[in-house]
């Protein structure tokens, strides 16, 4: 007789949330549980699998080899679980949501994610605006948007709506970039986090540079780089397929990480806004 073993999805959700937020306190706030309860759930999951999932040597909640293996499976299981519940939900989600996004996310990641959302919730109307993060946060405070995906210069896991950190990279066309004199930069207007980080890193490294082209949207930046006019800086997940990351450059300095947060007008958020926020958070991890 076959004995089947099952993984409780609530334990998997706790495991993924603790990893993504790098702590039991923040995970408890998101999941509505106390810190001891979150810790107990992690211990229960480790007991079920007979594996240690987080390293006990540091306080940074780093995954063990077993934890790394579980993480991908856990995300897939939870995505299927949530999708199935949505399919069987008797409550129809309707209404409109005003969503604000940085240009590069609107261009590279959101069509896939939002396309899937709109197919699943055809009665929800999305109004999407694309601006610099500094403007998105300002307009969020003015209640122009219901939901905003914003970037932050510093990685602060305690920041409101923090989702993840992401590495910044230098980006060029597929031909090996060659620089004669100053490094040519193609950037968004002043106020752009990528622009500020690029200029700061080059200054610290004492690398000569010049801005040769300024344009606010990723399509324009992509076209200019494709023509060989210069290079730019982007978050790793937003690099278009037509461009490449510049690796192991002796000239270009490391750029570090940025923080990404999802801000929601929680006091007046509709069911559609809540559902989109959950959807984005799950798909952007």
Image (spheres, rainbow, N blue to C red):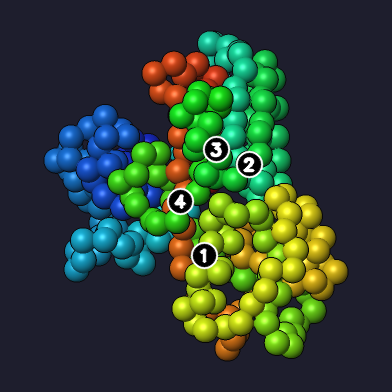
Task: Give the mark, 4 or 3, whose residue is nearer the N terminus.
Answer: 3
Mark 2 and mark 1: span between their CA atoms? 18 Å
Q: Mark 4 points at which residue?
A: 152
Rendering coords of residue 177 (x, y %): 74, 81
Task: Give the mark, 1 or 4, whose residue is nearer the N terminus.
Answer: 4
What residue is at 18 percent from the left and 35 percent from the top? 34
Task: Determine whether label 2 and label 4 are within 8 Å by CB.
Answer: no
Mark 3 and mark 2: span between their CA atoms? 6 Å
All told, the count of numbered labels is 4
Q: Badge 3: how crowded within 10 Å, few (<14), some, or many (20+)?
A: many
Task: Determine whether label 3 and label 2 are within 8 Å by CB.
Answer: yes
Task: Give the mark, 3 or 2, whose residue is nearer the N terminus.
Answer: 2
Mark 3 and mark 1: span between their CA atoms? 19 Å
Above/below status of 176 relative to 263: below
Image mark for residue 131: 2
SS state under label 2:
loop
| The image quarter in which residue 50 lies | bottom left
Q: Mark 3 points at which residue?
A: 136
Task: Give the mark, 2 or 1, whose residue is nearer the N terminus.
Answer: 2
Q: Badge 4: how crowded within 10 Å, few (<14), some, or many (20+)?
A: some
Task: Determine whether label 4 and label 3 are within 8 Å by CB.
Answer: no
Task: Determine whether label 1 and label 4 are within 8 Å by CB.
Answer: no
Task: Determine whether label 2 and label 1 are within 8 Å by CB.
Answer: no
Mark 2 and mark 4: span between their CA atoms? 14 Å
**73 or 107: nearer the eye?**
107
Image mark for residue 197: 1
Mark 4 and mark 3: span between their CA atoms? 11 Å
The answer to whether residue 91 is seen in the rendering is: yes
């Amino acid at each position: 007789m076959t004995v089947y073993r099952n993984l409780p999805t609530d334990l998997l959700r706790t495991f993924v949330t603790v990893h993504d937020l790098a702590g039991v306190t923040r995970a408890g706030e998101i999941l509505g549980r106390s810190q001891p309860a979150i810790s107990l759930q992690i211990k229960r999951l480790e007991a079920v699998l007979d594996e240690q999932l987080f390293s006990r040597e540091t306080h940074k909640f780093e995954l063990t080899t077993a934890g790394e293996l579980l993480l991908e499976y856990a995300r897939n299981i939870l995505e299927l679980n949530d999708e199935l519940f949505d399919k069987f939900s008797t409550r129809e989600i309707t209404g409109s949501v005003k969503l604000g996004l940085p240009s590069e996310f609107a261009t590279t990641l959101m069509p896939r994610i939002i396309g899937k959302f709109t197919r699943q919730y055809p009665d929800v109307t999305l109004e999407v605006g694309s601006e610099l993060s500094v403007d998105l946060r300002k307009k969020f405070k003015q209640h122009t948007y219901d939901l905003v995906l914003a970037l932050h210069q510093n990685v602060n896991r305690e920041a409101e709506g923090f989702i993840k950190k992401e590495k910044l990279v230098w980006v060029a066309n597929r031909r090996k970039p060659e620089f004669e004199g100053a490094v040519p930069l193609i950037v968004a207007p002043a106020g752009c986090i990528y622009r500020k980080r690029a200029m700061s890193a080059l200054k610290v490294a004492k690398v000569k540079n010049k801005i040769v082209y300024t344009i606010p949207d990723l399509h324009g930046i992509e076209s200019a780089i494709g023509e060989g006019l210069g290079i730019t800086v982007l978050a790793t997940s937003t690099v278009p397929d037509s461009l490449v990351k510049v690796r192991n450059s002796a000239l270009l300095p490391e750029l570090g990480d940025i923080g990404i947060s999802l801000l929601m007008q929680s006091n007046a958020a509709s069911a559609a806004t809540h559902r989109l926020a959950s959807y984005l958070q799950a798909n952007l991890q």
